[in-house]
Amino acid sequence: MRDSLTERQELAVPSNSAASEAVPNVRTHSWLFLTANLTEERFFLILSVFIGIFAGLAVICLRLAIDWTSISLLGPAPSPHTLPVLLMPAVVGLVIAVLVIHVFPQVRGSGVNQTKAAFYIFNGRIPFRTAVGKFITAALAIGSGQSLGPEDPSLQIGASLAWVIGRRMKFSREKLRLLAPVGAAAGLAAAFNAPISAVLFVIEEVIGRWSAAILGSVVLSAISSVVVVRSFLGAQPLFRIPPLATVHPTELLAYAVLGIVGGLAAVVFAKAIGYFRPLLVALPKATRYFQPALAGLMIGFIGYLGAPQVMGAGYESIDQAMHDHFTWTVLAGLAGLKILATTLSIITGTPGGMFAPTMFIGAMLGGAVGGVERHFYPHLTGTTGTYALVGMGVLFAGFMRVPMTSVFMVLELSGDYSIIVPVILANAIAYVISRSLQETPIFDLLTRQDGLNLPSLEEQREEGILRVEDAMKLPPAPVLDSRLTVAEAIEQLQGTSSDVFLVRSSPSGWGSLNRDVFERVVNEGKPGTTLASLLPAQPLPYLHPDHPLEMALRYVEQTPLVPVVSRADLGKLEGIITGEDVFARYRVATGESP
Amino acid sequence: MRKPALEPITSRPPVVIALLVLLALVGLFCVGRLVHHFQQEEKALARQLYWRSLREQVAGKEDLAIQHFRAALSYDRDNFEYQLALARALVDSGRTQEAESYLIGLWERFPQNGEVNLALGRLAAKEKSLDRAIQYYHNAIYGLWVSDAEQNRVQAWFELIRVLIGLGARQQAEAELLSLSANVPPNAEMELRTANLFAEVQDYEHALTEYRRALGSDPTNAAALAGAGEAAYKLSRYRTAAGYLEAAAKARPQDAQLTQLLRTSQLVLENDPFNRRISRVERDRRLRKIFQDAGQRLDACIEAGAPQTSNSPTSSDLMSPLKGRWTKMKSKLGLLGTSRESDLPDEIMDLVLQIEQQTTACGMTAKDQALLLLAENRAGVEQ
């Protein structure tokens, strides 16, 4: 209990200092009730709501910009065998390359990694110029038909807006850093119209760990941005969700097959990006002017030949796949072509996101698997929409390696919990296959290719956590009672060689005394002195066996030994731990001799 | 020159919050206007695409029409009119599954809408799903219609009955017809359609009633006269039939079938030996004539080679005994009109019936048809 209090105190230190700065001014403005106790913590929460609102507005503008660009460049109904479809992605690709190279160098790629890097390396800094650049280039790229989506740019734009606002507020460095995920969640939630998935994605991918410190702010910003988007663009998801149904328990086998197919497709997709991206980066810099244009030309060619569905974000095609518009062969073909088109867009560094293409590929693969099953077992198959929806989750789990987000995304989009079993089954299979065949998740892979090494939740999951119980020793004998006199204590200690002894004071406090102290008191002629009066005013900190070992590091420098006590009975000593024990255990963990 | 350091805004929270609120309000207003303007533009674009699709549909370019209906929906995706148009286009082009999912989506939003239910009913009928078809058609009949509700409901009802007939559910069709006939507005065309459907399910009694209703609205309606004549004929009410058919034949002199029915009806009336208004002598004369005619037909058929019918294994095998029976019966004709005639008229008519039935493969004249009908309905012919 004490250590958790200590933790809270430690965490509260910057807040208190900020509060102490704020208090005099707050009092001068006491005419405003809401300012009465406005600490930085609370102000941060209020600000999260505003970040959500501004991010929501920015994302609405981005969506309009993409739609407007698409209508202007490709026409209101892009169809095969038309010149705009063939040429526009290439022509606009040249413009994007010039903008990225000369005006907005920070906007290459999806934006997720950049936001994560801002969080971990640059104290949350994503300049406003980056947000503007991302807005323009992403709108041009997606609107002209590059196979990318608006979600990841929205995430980065949200994070950038949050940083800009936070900087104006002169927040502490810690708070500025935390603003990046808050803005990211708001941007993603607005783009995706799904706040829970956005929050989970930001936790899984951007923050890379479960952090209670900003969870409230992240949720608030995500919800406020979604409220803004829904109030302007409506509450419906990006595509219409058809009635979902699973017909028979044996259908789970088909979902298992979908998991396998999705997992393999995710590996192919990730490996293609991982292989080709460094090759293009290694080419002479002058080629960067032409790379997005070449990718655009190839994508335009795919569209020109008969598959304009793979161009742009592809929400309409996802909608059509969910409503049985395509045969399974067409669905499988579109999935393959989308993997190719998206790979081209991503490896050339064209600004835009991977969310929408991943959903597209997943929906097509899901629909194809459902179609094949219906061909052979028409009475055992639910709707194609169900397979397409589950397929989206599968690709998310396999390609982006965000298992929690992938499950909740499907449930949130469908609003139907009846499909949770097939979703979990298929996602788990895809995730396991992807992890087995592709060691590094795609976002980590891209980050490492860019020369950065950022933490990830998956990495954390794989790390074994060392706990206090792994390093503690059995309690030494004897443990002295604080009510004993020094003379009685010396009597009890006869035959022991230790210099430091633990003292239990009622009811659950702990202290330690040195043998020298006893000798000094006896020499002073006060052997009747009680141990309680000799103990320092500050009680000894203690740990529990399940505490992470790193927590012990905080105390072992202050005191030669730290008691490890039971959670059920704070007076019951389970063991002791010293600095030497902690370091010895870490040496074992890293393969050194203890 | 060095910029002065920014004062921490957090030290002035009320000002900051007020500024943020103001900024948010301005942003919300501006984006709201922008969204409104853009949505109007998109709706106008969708309308253009919709009209274009309709023109393409008329020109028979179904695929292009579907593509543009879809494009229209991508700009105005909740538009009921476009969705319905797309669903109809999909049904027309045979993409029933996709059409169904579209329509079910619409149905979930507008479960009482007559048009949606009618379209779903048509789909179910196409898939030969009787229960679903009936359910959706009933929803359409009792549902809400934007305009011409009464007429649309009756049309849907007619369509349901036609579907039921098509799917072989005659009894259900008849039940629906009975309900419909009570709700059909006083309109000759509607009444005629109802009557025709009654005739189609072989409920000639109700068919005749409905034809009469139609004639009440339009006494010179040739189709109603012909229908009434035919219904009466089927009910063996040859006098009534002859009346209607005569009037119909005047309006449609080229209609061979009508003329044939009229002629048959007249022959039945002329030759009916059981007519209570004729004398016994006349009855015996008619019986003899019928008997002679049957004999001649039998001889002609035997001479022609007695083609095999589907009903008889070999007609010649059956015709020889018939000829023997006819000859034997001929010797008894003298008993007609005497106190010893007993069941002789019925025996004659039984033999005539058998001869006419066995000689159908040799071709049926109006007279043969009349003989057959007389033999079949010897007590039921309208007096």
Image (spheres, helix red, strand yellow):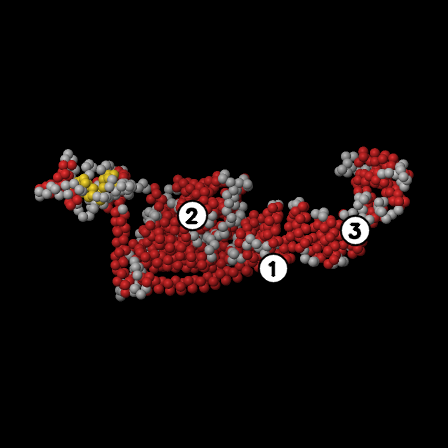
Instruction: Give whichever of A548, B306 is nearer the camera.
Output: A548
> Crowdedness of circle 3 by 10 Å Cα count: few (<14), some, many (20+)?
many
Q: Residue at x 20, y 37 (%)?
A: A476
Residue A522 point in image, percent of width and height:
10, 41
The residues bearing labels 3 and 1 have C-alpha atoms spaced at a distance of: 41 Å
Which residue lies under the disc numbered 1? B147
Q: Amino acid at mark 3?
A: Ala
Q: Are marks 3 and 2 in contact (CB under 8 Å)?
A: no
- Chain letter for the residue marked with disc 3 in the picture: B
Is residue A519 among what the camera can see?
yes
Instruction: Give whichever of A478, A300 is nearer the camera.
Output: A478
Residue B72 in the figure: left or right of residue B342: left
The residues bearing labels 1 and 2 have C-alpha atoms spaced at a distance of: 44 Å
Q: Amino acid at mark 2?
A: Phe
Q: Secondary structure at mark 1?
A: loop
Q: Nearer the viewer, mark 3 or mark 2?
A: 3
> Crowdedness of circle 1 by 10 Å Cα count: few (<14), some, many (20+)?
few
- Chain letter for the residue marked with disc 2 in the picture: A
Residue A159 in the figure: left or right of residue B353: left
Residue B241 - label: 3
Q: Residue at x 49, y 57 (%)?
A: A74
Residue A259 point in image, percent of width and height:
45, 42
> Crowdedness of circle 2 by 10 Å Cα count: few (<14), some, many (20+)?
many
The residues bearing labels 3 and 2 have C-alpha atoms spaced at a distance of: 74 Å
Q: Identify the image quadrant of residue B273.
A: top right
Q: Amino acid at mark 1?
A: Ser
Which residue lies under the disc numbered 2? A408
Residue B256 point in image, percent of width and height:
79, 50
